[in-house]
């Protein structure tokens, strides 16, 4: 059996024909379960088939065109009028071919079979077409349901339900911290997690799923309801179950943030707002987390200004750097980040602190004749998902600048880096820089590897990309112009190198820098 088929939910198929011999033939023609289908039932006339369509809700119906009481065309039209959501495959004899052609003009008919030419390959081909058509229809229907639910919640039109409470579970793809803030729009309908609603548990710990909708880039909001009296812990259990299902389905890290509401309208929108604001602060709780948004120290409504980071004191760090004492440096850096966790999680303060420390770090590197770099990318042990990871990365970065390596670069290497900084926009080669310094290219390569642990090309690329980032932040220049100004003849090659260094394409970096 195909592993991909095993993971699919079986498609329910209804078979309708007034000839018993045809019903038996179709039922035994293929191993249905092995191909991801199951026979939901059979009927010998259209009237009975219509009742079964509404009762059994099959995904696909294989229908004979000519039958007593209600023929195939009447059945298809009646099912469509009732929004049964079924994809039909029509069957006919040779004499009914024109009649079958009429059926194919109906929007819910995906194909046809000629009875006397029917074999396993032909049946599987038409079933696959019907499956694909049904899945496309269902994706459209799910998107429409999600959009209606999203508009009802955000528009405060969701009704109160006496005796019930609502629970919001917000799923968010885990992303490493980036020094340029990226804040998904909470009202945006697109770019959410690609998680089919059918993959979300329908009922768990007393909570019943109402629906789901996207709530910004990389986010999916799932709405539950339940009887009053359900505990906060039961919502946490439901949220954990949803997170586990989502992580398994998506094959990547997912966290969830849950909040409860005792009513609809503004109260439900506020619950969603709390979950979104908690998700924005994910760096304070790490990845694969299950977080009660009602219990975390997150300011809501969000505090966008007035951060305490303006009062960041660097005297302890300066003392540690001046004394070149690793323990003092580490203690000072960690203290700066610990202050951001109490009394509230200070996200604006975190970005401000990272900005200040990055600037200070690169000032020290520039003074040592080294190119600027992102201290998180260079010194974090793996992706920085938590504020503690960020603190450790900066502590390691500053400890290195206080050590002997960067402050004792040879004069030849300092001169080489200065030459790169002056000529990065040119078609620069290691031979050019070596000639300017007065040494051989092979010896210069040896100096870069021995003193920096990097190649000449690594440093040239870092300097070029840092200059490109400056232009992207400060100017509205075209990509072709930027690539030429930083030494790349091909905009495509520039984009590839930019993404290799930063993890983003140039236009994505510019968008994230916009206020």
Image (cartoon, rainbow, N blue to C red):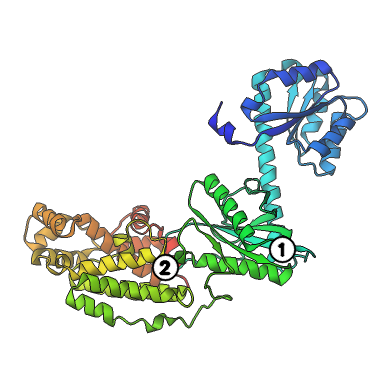
- Estimate how packed mark 1 is, as few (under 14), some (14 to 19) or many (20 or more) residues with alpha carbons within 10 Å: few
Please report the residue visible at 41 percent of the width from the left and 73 percent of the height from the top: 350
Counting residues from the N terminus, which is met first, the one under dot 1 or under dot 2?
Answer: 2
Residue 484 visible in rendering: yes
- Residue mark closest to the camera, 1 vs 2: 1
> Relative to 439, is 164 on the left or the right?
right
| Count of residue discs | 2
Residue 399 has which mark?
none
> Relative to 191, is 76 on the left or the right?
right
Residue 229 has which mark?
1
Residue 180 has which mark?
2
Q: Is residue 92 above or below residue 278?
A: above
Query: Horizontal and vertical percent for residue 513?
Result: 44, 69
Please report the residue visible at 70 percent of the width from the left and 43 percent of the height from the top: 137
Query: Horizontal and vertical percent for residue 158?
Result: 74, 65
- Estimate how packed mark 2 is, as few (under 14), some (14 to 19) or many (20 or more) residues with alpha carbons within 10 Å: few
Image-quadrant location for residue 269: bottom right
Query: Horizontal and vertical percent for residue 501?
Result: 33, 57
Element type at mark 1: loop
């Amino acid at each position: 059996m195909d592993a991909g088929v095993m993971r699919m939910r079986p498609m329910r198929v209804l078979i309708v024909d007034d000839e018993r011999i045809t019903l038996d033939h179709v039922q035994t023609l293929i191993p249905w379960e092995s191909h991801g289908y199951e026979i939901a039932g059979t009927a010998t006339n259209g009237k009975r088939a219509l009742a079964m369509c509404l009762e059994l809700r099959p995904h696909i119906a294989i229908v004979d065109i000519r039958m007593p009481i209600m023929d195939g065309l009447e059945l298809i039209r009646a099912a469509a009028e009732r929004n049964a959501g079924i994809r039909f495959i029509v069957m006919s004899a040779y004499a009914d071919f024109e009649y079958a052609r009429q059926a194919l003009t109906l929007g819910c008919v995906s194909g046809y079979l000629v009875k006397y030419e029917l074999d396993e390959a032909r049946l599987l081909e038409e079933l696959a077409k019907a499956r694909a058509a049904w899945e496309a229809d269902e994706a459209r229907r799910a998107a429409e349901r999600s959009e209606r639910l999203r508009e009802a919640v955000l528009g405060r039109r969701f009704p109160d339900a006496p005796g019930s409470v609502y629970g919001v579970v917000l799923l968010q793809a885990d992303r490493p911290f980036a020094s340029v803030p990226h804040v998904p729009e909470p009202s945006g309908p697109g770019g959410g997690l690609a998680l089919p609603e059918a993959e979300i548990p329908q009922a768990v710990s007393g909570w019943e799923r109402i629906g789901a909708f996207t709530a910004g880039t990389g986010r999916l909001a799932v709405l539950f309801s339940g009887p009053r009296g359900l505990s906060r812990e039961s919502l946490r259990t439901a949220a954990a179950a949803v997170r586990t299902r989502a992580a398994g389905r998506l094959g990547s890290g997912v966290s969830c943030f849950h909040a409860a509401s005792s009513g609809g309208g503004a109260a439900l929108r506020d619950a969603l707002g709390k979950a979104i604001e908690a998700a924005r602060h994910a760096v304070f709780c790490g990845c694969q987390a299950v977080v009660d948004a009602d219990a975390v120290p997150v300011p809501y409504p969000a505090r966008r200004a007035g951060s305490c980071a303006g009062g960041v004191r660097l005297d302890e760090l300066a003392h540690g750097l001046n004394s070149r004492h690793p323990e003092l440096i580490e203690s000072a850096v960690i203290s700066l980040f610990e202050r951001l966790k109490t009394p509230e999680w200070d996200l604006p303060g975190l970005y401000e602190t990272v900005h200040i420390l990055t600037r200070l770090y690169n000032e020290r590197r520039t003074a040592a004749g080294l190119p600027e770099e992102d201290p998180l990318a260079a010194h974090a042990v793996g992706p920085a998902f938590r504020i503690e990871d960020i603190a450790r990365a900066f502590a390691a970065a500053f400890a290195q600048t206080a050590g002997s390596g960067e402050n004792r670069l040879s004069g030849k290497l300092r001169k080489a880096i200065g030459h790169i900084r002056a000529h990065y926009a040119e078609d620069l080669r290691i031979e050019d820089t070596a000639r300017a310094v007065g040494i051989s290219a092979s010896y210069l390569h040896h100096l870069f590897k021995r003193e920096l642990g990097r190649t000449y090309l690594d440093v040239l690329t870092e300097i070029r990309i840092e200059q490109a980032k400056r232009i992207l932040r400060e100017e509205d220049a075209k990509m072709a112009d930027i690539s030429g100004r930083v030494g790349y003849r091909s905009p495509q090659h520039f984009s590839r190198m930019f993404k290799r260094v930063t993890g983003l394409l140039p236009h994505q970096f510019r968008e994230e820098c916009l206020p």
